[in-house]
Amino acid sequence: MQILEQRFLRGPNIHADSPCLLSIVDLQDLYGRSTRDLPGFNEALLNLLPSLRGERLPGAATGLGGGFAQRLHEGTYLGRVIEHVTLELQTLAGAPASYGRTRPVTGHPGQFRIVCAYQSEKLAQPAFELATEIVEALAHGEAFDIEPRLEELRALAGRYAIGTSTAAVLTAAQERGIPVQRITEDANLFLLGWGVKQKRLQATTTGDTSFIAVKIASDKQLTKALLKEAGVPVPEGEVVTTIEAAQRAARRLNAPVTLKPLDGNQGKGVTVDCKTPDDVARAFEFARQFGRRIIVERHVTGRDYRVLVAGGQVAAASCRRPAHVVGDGIKTVRELVEIENANPARGAGHATILTRIALDEHASDMLARQGFEFDSVLPVGVTAELRGNANLSTGGTAEDVTDFLPDSTRLLCVRAAAKIGLDVAGIDIVCQDISQPLAAQRGAVIEVNAAPGIRMHQYPSAGEPRDAGEAIVDGLMGRSNGRIPVIALTGTNGKTTTTLLVAHTVRMAGQVTGVTTTEGVFIDGKQIVKGDCTGYWSARTVLGAPEVEVAVLETARGGILKRGLAFDRCDVAIVLNVAGDHLGLDGVETIEDLAQVKAVVAQSAAKAVVLNAEDALCVQMARRVKPGAEVLFFSMEAENPIILKHLEDGGRGAYLQDGALVLADGHSQQAVIKVESMPVSFGGLARFNIANALAAAAGLMAAGYSHLQIAAGLSTFVSNGRTNPLRTNMFDVRGVTVIVDYAHNPAAYAAMADMARGMLPGQLVGIVTAPGDRRDSDLEEIGRVCGERFDELVVYESQSRGREVGEAVDLIIGGAEEAVGMSDTLHREIEVDKAIRLGLSLCQPGDVLVFACGSSLQVFVDAIRVTDPESADLIAAQTV
C-alpha cells in the first residue's frame, strides 16, 4: 500500500464546503480484496478501535443497521476502511472529524482518491498515515500496537489545539458570520475579517490592544500608581529585590502582606496573608522563581473576584476560589486531588475548561499553614486550600456574579481598564462582598491583566455562563461582519480579461481593489506578485491585505482542485463558460466534471451568480446556487430563450442588442454603452471580449454599481501588452498585424481565428501549440479547429509535460491534416523562436498573424530581434 499524493483542500471544494485532506492511495496487492475476504481482519480492526463498532454511516437510519461494523462484515473495499479509520483516529486524538468520501481513480486500477475532513492539518496527515499502516498490517494478518502511536496523535492535537479562551472568541465571530483564518498552525494568531475590515486576535489580545498598555499591565507597581491616580482603590506596597528588603517593607506596612513577582501572570509566584518574617522569606523565595523584582503589598482580606471589561463595558464577573479539596474522612489530600484531576473538565494548560491541581512545594506550604500535609486525611466537610491565589490556571474554580456588581464597581472597572489603556482587561478585585461598593469595605483592585482568560466566564463552575467571547468580538468589530465585497470569476476562457474589466471599473468608482489574475496579484493597480496567481494562496494575499476595499479574484480550475477556495463565500460569482480543457487531469475526465469544478465558485456566492445563458452547463448551475442568491444571465443574443424567460420572470441580466450592451430586469432595459465605445471589443471584431464585457457588466450591476459607473469602466479599459499581457495584444510588424494571445484550447483558438479573419483582407497565419498534458483527442481537436481556420499553420512545442518532444506537435498536425488533408500550408517547427520567424516569413503586408499560447510577450520580442531588431524594440516599448 502506498500514498501517492496528498493535498489539503483548505476551503470549499468539489468534495465539501469544509477543509479536507485529499489523498491518492495505491492498494497494490490488496486491490480487489474486500474486508469479507480477509480472515480475521474485521474483528482485529474492531478490537483495535472498539469505537468503530458504534460508528454510524452518514444517512443510516437509527435502528436500521447501516453502521460501519455491519458494512465491514458485509464486505467493503480497503480504501473506504482507511477513510473511516483516519476520521476515527482524529476523533480519538481529540479533534473530531466526521466527513469522508472514497472513490476509485479512473483509469488507474488499485488507486483510490480518499477525502477526509479535519480540524488540524498537523494532525490530519499523521492520522492518515497511521490509518494506512493499521489497515495494511491487519490485512496481512499482522498485530499492531496502536497505543504509543495514538498517544503521539493526542500530543500533536494538544500541541496545536486552540486554547479555550481563543476558541470562545472565534466561535462568537463565526456565529456572526465573520470570516476567521488561522495565520499558521504553529501560532494562536488569527485574522478576523478581510481587507480594510480585518482585525487580528491572539488569545484575548486584539490588534487594537496597545503595546504600551500591555507593558504597563505587566508592571504591577506602575499599574497601581496609575490606578491610584485615577481614584481606584489599590493596596499599599513597594518593590524589593532582597529578602531583607521584603521583610522591612512588611514591617512598615504593619499588616499581613502578599508577595508576588512584579511582572508575573496567571497567579504564578503569588503568596498571600504572610504574617511573620519567615512567611515573608518563604514567599520571597517562591516569587523569585518567576521574577527578579518582587512586590510586597498590604494583604487585602476577602474573596477573589475577576471582572472582564471589553469594548468599554463590563462583560462578566466571577468569584474565584483557589484550588481546594473537601474532606470525606476517608481519603488523603493526595487521593482527593487525584480524584479531582480525573475530572474530564480538567487538563493541562488552557486547552480545557479547568486546569489540573498541582501537588508541588507551594501546595505543601499552603497545606502546612492549615495544619495538613499531602497524606493527611481531611475530616468530613473540611476544606483544604492548595493555592494562595484563585487563578483558574493554578486549578481554581469560578462562580458567576455578574448580576451582583453595583454600578459604582462597574464604572470603577471600566475606568481602570481605560486608565491602563486596554481594550480587553481582566480586573482583579479582593473584597468581602462584591455586591457592595468597594469603598465601604476596604476592597481594592489588586491587578489589571492584559489578555485575560475567559474560561471562568464561559464555563463557570456555578452561576450563569456569560458569552465573554461575544463581548470581545463586539468590542473589536462593532457592527461589522468583517467582510469586504468579493467578486470571484471563473470559466474556461476569458477569465483574466473579465477580471480586469471588473477591477478597472471598481477602481474608477474610487475603491481600492485587490486583484488576482494569471499575471499576478495587484493591489490598487500595482503589481505586488508576478506569475500565475489564480489559486488559494494568491486570493489569501488579497483578502489579507489591510488596504483592500474590494477583492476581484480570478479563480481557476487548478487552484480549486489543489487547495479549494480561499474564501467561505463571495458576494458575486461570475461563470463565463465551460469548454473542454485540462480534461484527464486531477480526476476531471469529462466536460461535465469540469463544470462541477467551476460550480464550486457559483455555489459560494451569497448575493448573486452571473451565468452564461448560451452555455448549457452554466445554465444548469442556476439550480445549485445558495438560497437567497440572485441569478443573472448574460447573452450575446437578445432573443436567447433562457434570458428572455428569465427577464419575463422578473430576473436581471445583460445582452447585446443593436450594437449596444443592455442591462435589463423584468421592468426596464437600458443600453449602457455602444460596442465601439469599448476599446476591448476592437471595433466589435472581438466578440469574445464583448461577451466578457456583458459578464462584467452583469456582475458589477449585481454588486451594486450604477449604469454610469459601469459605462465609465468599460469605455476606459484598454487591453494591451501593459494592462493585459497575452490577451489579444496587437502589434504592427512592417505592415503585418500580429495578435499575441494565450489561446490554448479549441474554443479559444476558434474565437481568436474568427476575430482575426475579420480584420484585414489578407491571409491568416497561425503559430499554435498546446501543453502536452492534454489528451490526444484534445490536441487533435485543436489541430482540426486551426486547420479549418488558418490559411498557413505553424505548430511548435510549448511544454511537453511528460510526452516525448514533438509528440504533441504531431498530434496537432495530425488533426489539421484530418481537416484540410496533406498540405504544404501545414508547418512543423519544434522551437518557438524558429516557429515565430517562420510564421512571419509566410506573411505579406496586409496579412494577420496570430501567435498563440506563448509564455510571455518577451518570447515573441526575442524571436524577431534576430531578424528585425527595430520592430522588436518598438514592441518592447509598448509592453513596459
Image (cartoon, rainbow, N blue to C red):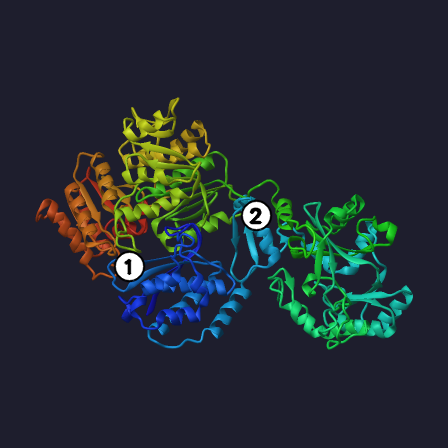
Q: Quadrant of the N terminus?
A: bottom left
**Viewed as shown, does residue 481 lie left or right of 219?**
left
Q: Which mark is residue 173?
A: 2
> 526 or 675: nearer the eye?
675
Q: Residue furthest top?
A: 667
| CA separation in Å, label 2 and label 1 | 39 Å
**Viewed as shown, does residue 448 lie left or right of 467?**
right
What secondary structure is found at the residue carrying circle 1?
loop
- Residue under pointer 1: 105
Is residue 712 visible to the viewer in this orientation of the structure? yes
The numbered mark, 2 or 1, whose residue comes first in the sequence reads: 1
Instruction: Please tell me in which quadrant of the rendered image residue 584 appears.
Output: bottom left
What secondary structure is found at the residue carrying circle 2?
helix
Instruction: Please tell me in which quadrant of the rendered image residue 832 appears.
Output: bottom left
Q: Position of residue 27 (x, y in %)?
A: 30, 67
Q: Position of residue 526 (x, y in %)?
A: 46, 45
Crowdedness of circle 1 by 10 Å Cα count: few (<14), some, many (20+)? some
**Viewed as shown, does residue 374 lie left or right of 641?**
right
Q: Position of residue 464 (x, y in %)?
A: 68, 50
- In the image, is residue 867 above or below residue 631? below
Q: Residue at x 14, y 49 (%)?
A: 815
Given the image, on which type of amino acid does mark 1 rest?
Answer: Val
- In the image, is residue 148 above or below residue 176? below
> 196 or 560: nearer the eye?
560
Q: Position of residue 455 (x, y in %)?
A: 65, 56
Given the image, on which type of amino acid does mark 2 rest?
Answer: Ala
> 820 or 479: nearer the eye?
479
Q: Which mark is residue 159?
A: none
Crowdedness of circle 2 by 10 Å Cα count: few (<14), some, many (20+)? many
Q: Residue at x 81, y 49 (%)?
A: 230
- In the image, is residue 493 above or below residue 354? above
